[in-house]
Image (spheres, rainbow, N blue to C red):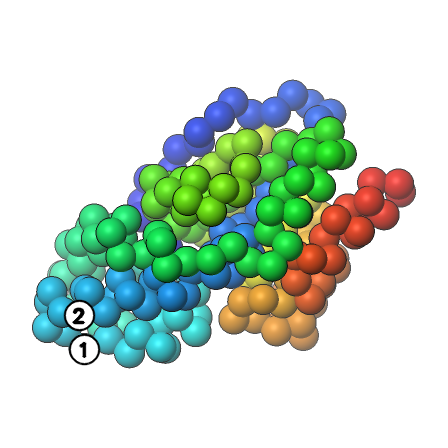
Amino acid sequence: MASTASTASARPTDPGVLTVGFDLDMTLIDSRPGIRTCFEALVARTGTYVDCDLVVSRLGPPLEEELAHWFPAERVAAMGDLYREMYPEHAITGSLAMPGAREAIAAVHEAGGRALVVTAKYEPNAKLHLEHLRIDADAVVGSLWAEEKARALREYGASVYVGDHTGDVRGARTAGAYSVAVATGPCDEAELRGAGADVVLTDLTRFPAWLAEHSRR
C-alpha cells in the first residue's frame, strides 16, 4: 500500500539482460494477515471503525485510497503516516510467502536474469517483508501503482511484469512489458484477461515452467 515517494534500491540493469518485475502483495507475499493486524491496531489507536476483512479483500491500490473509505479527507495523510509507522511492528511477521514465490525468483536467476519488485507499498516496509521471508529480489521500487509502475519497469528494462491485479496489467502494458497475471489476489481470471493480461496463471508455482517456455521463443 503506497505512500507518495518512490526510490529504487539498486542500479538499473544493463540492456539485454533479462529483467522480470514482480508485484508484492498477493503476488509474492500473502500480506493479508499482517495488514489485518495493522489495521486492527490502527482502529485501537484511533477509535475509528474499519472493516478489516473488507480491507484485506481488495488489496492493491494505494493505502490512501483505502483510508479514504474510513477517515475524513483531512485526516487521511496523517493516518497514512501513522499506519506506516506501525506497520513494521504489526504486519511483517504475520505475512507469508505465496506458494511458488521463492521458486519464481530463483527461476529468473537461473535464467541469468534479475528479479525486480515494483509495488504500491511503502518501500522500506516492502524491503522488510522480503528480508523477513528471504525472498531474494535484486531491486525494490515502492510507492508506484498501476500505470505509474511503468516508470520503474522502463528504467530497469523489465520485459515481463507479474502481478495479481488489473492495475498490474495496466502497468505492464504501459511499459510495453509482457503481462503475466496470477489469479491469487482480488481479481479473477476473467478480470485479468479483460484488462489485457498476455497470460494468466493460477499461481506462481506455474511461473518457472512458463518462463522456461517463454525464453525459448
Residue 184 figure quarter: bottom right
Give the residue type that dot 2 points to. Answer: Val
List the residue tagged with mark 2. Answer: 43
Q: Position of residue 211 (x, y in %)?
A: 77, 46
Q: Which residue is mark 1?
A: 49
> Is residue 170 visible to us here?
no
Q: Residue 53, image x and y in percent?
A: 35, 77
Visible residue check, residue 92: yes
Q: Is residue 36 above or below residue 130?
A: below
Find residue 214 and report its horizontal and vertical position in percent.
82, 46
Q: CA distance from mark 1 to mark 2?
A: 6 Å
- Give the answer, above or below, for where 196 lies relative to 49: above
Q: Position of residue 199 (x, y in %)?
A: 74, 59
Residue for point 21% across, 53% down: 86
Amino acid beneath label 1: Tyr
> In this image, 204 relative to 198: left or right?
left
Q: Considering only vertical position in the picture, is 183 above or below 28?
A: below
